[in-house]
Image: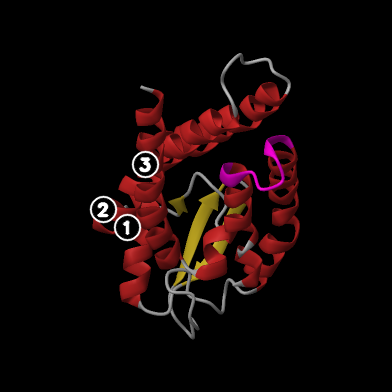
Amino acid sequence: MLLFLPVPLVLWLFTAAPLGPVASVLLGAAIIASHRLYARPFALARAGRRCLLCGGSAGDGPTLEIEEPLGTTAWRACSEAHANALARVLACAHLSRLPLKIGILGGLAVLLPGTLLAGADRLGTLAHADAAALFTLMVGAAVAPFGWLALTHRSDPQGPARLPFPVHIQALIGTRAVLWLFRIVGLVWLAQAARHAARLV
């Protein structure tokens, strides 16, 4: 659980900019770059003991192979029911890989350079708040629908599951908890982005 805390910390730095826009974004980017170095080995070392769906003890539950950007890895579920639920989530993630990448990676591609350029007065009247609002809009629009619909998707039984992002982040707290974060944070961010846009009109 503690190793997951850098994720909300980074999101807070990116959106609230408590240290000032440029310093907050640079610190957040540094945390992102370093997080994989310790979080991934921790998650992989426990991949055979923890359920990837609920985060509880997997016992002798079924194993799932997942093709992720960093290679094929093996994870466990604590029961057939959780394995089936995971298969649905992973199938939905693979099907939704383009909107997820556009929303998350595209949002970062807007926020990071946008904040630095705004800090250097290169974007006219646009400020970090505008880049942050677009970031929350893009990410929220990608993750909120996925969070609500992933468990309703039909799984693909052919071959290993495929995921567009590394698995270790969701393994830290369990996929089910991540889906709830997507549902809640996604909707909150969409509302915040809409409120920001309304103030500009």
- Rounded to the nearest angstrom, the CA distance separating label 3 from label 2 is 23 Å
Check the image and report above or below for 165 versus 88. Answer: above
Residue 107: x, y in percent? 52, 33
Q: Earlier in the sequence, mark 1 or mark 2?
A: 1
Q: Where's the C terminus, which quadrant?
A: top left
Which residue in the protein does label 2 denote?
A: 153
Residue 167: tell me if it is visible. Answer: yes
Residue 162: x, y in percent? 46, 49
Task: Classify mark 1: residues with Cα within 10 Å, few (<14), some (14-19) or many (20+).
Answer: many
Q: Callout 3, which amino acid?
A: Leu
- Rounded to the nearest angstrom, the CA distance separating label 3 from label 1 is 25 Å
- Rounded to the nearest angstrom, the CA distance separating label 1 from label 2 is 5 Å
Task: Classify mark 2: residues with Cα within 10 Å, few (<14), some (14-19) or many (20+).
Answer: some
Q: Earlier in the sequence, mark 3 or mark 2?
A: 2
Residue 46: x, y in percent? 62, 74
Q: Which mark is residue 190?
A: 3
